[in-house]
Image: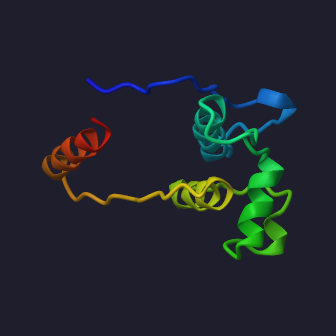
Amino acid sequence: SHVVRGSYRYYHYLQDGINDKGWGCAYRSLQTLHSWFHLNGYTAAYPPSHADIQKTLVTIGDKPQSFLGSREWIGSVEVGYVLNTLLRVECRSVYVRSGEELMGEAKRLARHFD
């Protein structure tokens, strides 16, 4: 069994006065991940707001200027771009074609954190 070590803050829809129901899940996941780095002393920076996340993606050239202030979804790739940009954390996407292949990758990932 593997669990997260250290503290983190769980970010969820409709938090902080932002109605992001239906489009904000990856923004909230990113904020939750960032909070772990903040609360465990890896950065003094607080988790970014939705506006900060969008600005980062526009600044690095991933999204057009029209993305600012939108309700457009982001995905795991964009979460990785923002974590890399703000925290210098390397993120990787692992693609699997089957449940059997997934089990092998899950075991490899678990060994990484042991």
* Residue found at x 59% / y 62%: 81
- Residue 105 seen: yes
Q: Position of residue 46 (x, y in %)?
A: 76, 38
Q: Position of residue 70 (x, y in %)?
A: 81, 57
In the displayed structure, 61 sits above or below 100; it is: below
Q: Nearer the viewer, residue 111 or 62?
A: 111
On-image quarter of the C terminus: top left
Q: Position of residue 38 (x, y in %)?
A: 66, 35
In the displayed structure image, the side of residue 84 where residue 15 appears, left or right: right
Residue farthest left in this picture? 100
In the displayed structure, 66 sits above or below 83; it is: below
Residue farthest front in this picture? 41
Q: Quadrant of residue 28?
A: top right
Q: Nearer the viewer, residue 81 or 87?
A: 87
In the displayed structure image, the side of residue 62 where residue 5 appears, left or right: left
In the displayed structure image, the side of residue 32 where residue 14 appears, left or right: right
In the displayed structure, 77 sits above or below 110; it is: below
* Residue found at x 83% / y 73%: 65
* Residue found at x 57% / y 39%: 33
- Residue 71 seen: no
On-image quarter of the N terminus: top left
* Residue found at x 71% / y 36%: 21
